[in-house]
Amino acid sequence: MPRLFSYGTLQQEQVQRAQFGRTLTGFADALPGWRSEMVEITDADVLAKSGLRFHPIVMPGAPTDSVTGTVFEISDEELAAADSYEVADYRRVEVTLASGLSAFVYVKA
């Protein structure tokens, strides 16, 4: 099963239910060496699901930077659903988290 690290709206239960048809369970972790800022979302579907006009987005930072979030184990189908949720500002990459686990994460395109 793929792991997905979320630091933003994919942690919201209403987004999970809308995108995956269920509420995910996960655990806290962090993404070392990355920093976050906000990006304006204009996609009507994403705005309706998240209820937020600005979403966090991560990019490489200083070695002391770190972004906290949640790791979810999801199916391949749910990973494809997550891909369809994220707008063009994001791209999916595989990273190593503070725990040593590898996971997919959406970063600044």
Image: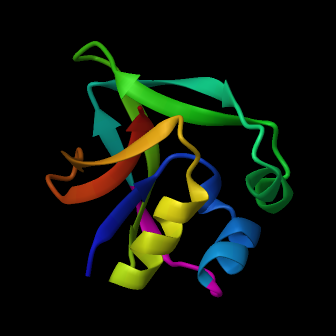
Q: How many marks?
A: 0
Tell me the residue at 37%/63% (across/down).
4
Residue 26, placed above or below residue 38: below
Tell me the residue at 30%/56% (across/down).
104
Q: Reply yes or no: does residue 25 show up in magenta.
A: yes
Q: Position of residue 108 (x, y in %)?
A: 44, 31
Q: Position of residue 66 (x, y in %)?
A: 36, 29
Examine the rendering and report whether any part of residue 75 can be seen: no
Q: Quadrant of the C terminus?
A: top left
Tell me the residue at 63%/25% (across/down).
38
Q: Which residues are magenta?
A: 21-28
Q: Residue furthest top?
A: 62
Pick the front one: 43 or 38: 43
Q: Position of residue 106 (x, y in %)?
A: 42, 46
Q: Is residue 6 found left or right of 19 in the rendered image?
A: left
Q: Quadrant of the N terminus?
A: bottom left
Residue 105, placed above or below residue 19: above
The colour mode here is rainbow
Residue 23 occupies quadrant: bottom right
Magenta segment's dominant SS is loop
Q: Is residue 83 found left or right of 92 in the rendered image?
A: right
Q: Position of residue 76 (x, y in %)?
A: 34, 81
Q: Reply yes or no: does residue 47 show up in magenta.
A: no
Residue 44, placed above or below residue 13: above
Pick the front one: 66 or 77: 77
Tell me the residue at 47%/40% (across/down).
90
Examine the rendering and report whether any part of residue 6 can be seen: yes
Residue 34, placed above or below residue 11: above
Q: Is residue 37 found left or right of 76 in the rendered image?
A: right
Q: Residue furthest left?
A: 100
